Image (cartoon, rainbow, N blue to C red):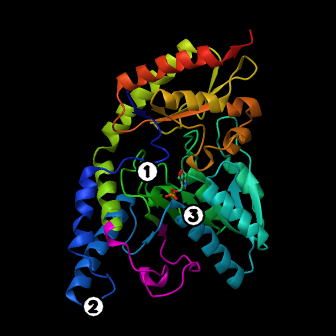
Amino acid sequence: MRRVYLDHTATTPLDPRVFESMKPFFVEKYGNASSIHRFGQEAKAALDESRDIIEKLIGAHPGEIFFVSSGTEADNFALKGVAWGLRKTSGKNHIITSKIEHHAVLGTCEFLEENGFAVTYLNVDGDGMVDPDDVRQSITPNTGIISIMHANNEVGTIEPVAEIAMVARDHQILFHSDAVQSFGKIPVSVGELVVDLLSLSAHKIYGPKGIGALYIRKGTALESLIHGGGQERGRRAGTENVPLAVGFAKAASLVQNDREVESARLLCLRSKLQSMMEGRFPWILVNGHPQQSLPHLLNISFDSTRIEIDGEALLFNLDLAGIAVTSGSACTSGSIEPSHVLLAMGRQEKTAKATIRFSMGRSTTAEDVEYTVDVLEDVVRRIGRVKE
Ligand SMILES: Cc1ncc(COP(=O)(O)O)c(C=O)c1O
């Protein structure tokens, strides 16, 4: 059976070149990067070089990248680290974020609320955009950190991060952005985005699972979350995962090398997919900003006022036909809860439940797109009930 993987936002396959780059650090160059002997120094050199590569790719200064276990940990580290630090030093206890953040940010904010912090969750408009004026108006003398994602993982909307960061800077408030989905798809420069903290993850860019990074602008005060040895310059204890760091850096270099060409190709495929869908299914609504959007992602809902269709049955039937898609973020797939992102954008609950997120990648071809739309047409004919 033909299989089409259209869930690159959830994760990507490991690039074989990345795998090759990592291999020696499992079996031959296995030293502990904190050891002073030659085995250790060999591992440390590879770790330093990997850090250096990622720093250069995002325009950071040396020593501003800290390796962590995932994008989730990077988000936790940024928010909890700053929050605990601020509480100690300035007593500030207010956080501003948006309703459409990834659960790694939202769950962390909820935890911080349970621990005495106050959080403002900003609304977004119908395209999933945060308004910098709303950020400005939510600032209080107690605001210590603002966290707004660079690009949304469900609908692909690219947020006006630099503008929001300037608002934060004007008020001397730290600014964090989750760039897990934007890195490798659109330019990510910590200078241009004016961020103090930025989260990254390797497995979204054909790198290994289990490693991410937090960019911490020099001089930014934050508490450590993991205590123990002095690894990662005392900020994140635990023996460094050298093979994964090497793989992360290799994956980042490779995506950066062909980012422009590949993003343009994916944009063409997305346009094709969107126009084919709109041609065949007059009841769909496209979610996300029409221009300020990630190139590889198309999120559509079946308008519940015009067609009745069960979202889960839709995904299940596509899977039976070999097509892997999701209805929202990977973390919530499998649950019947409507997406918090779509609800925040004003979609009806029933419509939000009948949603498909297509996210394309290196292996996606025009034939895959055509096959997907053909299969979907058949599935919709079988399980959908048009109301008009
Ligand atoms: C925007 C965003 N932030 C954070 C994460 C979590 O990253 P990781 O899977 O590396 O924990 C994801 C994963 O889907 C994401 O899309």
Residue at image coords 63%, 59%: 105
Residue 351: image location, x then y, percent:
71, 29
The type of residue carrying mark 3 is Asp
> Could you classify mark 2 by the number of other residues whose Cα lies within 10 Å: few (under 14), some (14-19), or many (20 or more)?
few
Q: Which residue is mark 1?
A: 204
Question: CA separation, marks 2 and 1?
Answer: 34 Å
Instruction: Give the magenta-colored segment's residue range.
Output: 214-243
Asked if the residues shown at circle 2 and circle 1 are in contact, with their CB atoms under 8 angstroms apart, the answer is no
Q: Earlier in the sequence, mark 2 or mark 1?
A: 2
Residue 83: image location, x then y, percent:
67, 74
Q: Looking at the picture, does residue 320 appear above or below residue 86?
A: above
Residue at image coords 68%, 46%: 131
The type of residue carrying mark 1 is Lys
- Main SS, magenta region, reads loop
Q: Report whether the residue tagged 3 is closer than 8 Å to ligand 1.
A: yes
Residue 241 lies in the magenta-colored region: yes
Residue at image coords 59%, 67%: 76
Q: Which residue is mark 2?
A: 36
Identify the element where label 3 is drawn: helix
Give the quadrant of residue 29: bottom left
Q: Nearer the viewer, residue 293 or 303?
A: 303
Residue 122 tag number: none
> Could you classify mark 1 by the number of other residues whose Cα lies within 10 Å: few (under 14), some (14-19), or many (20 or more)?
many
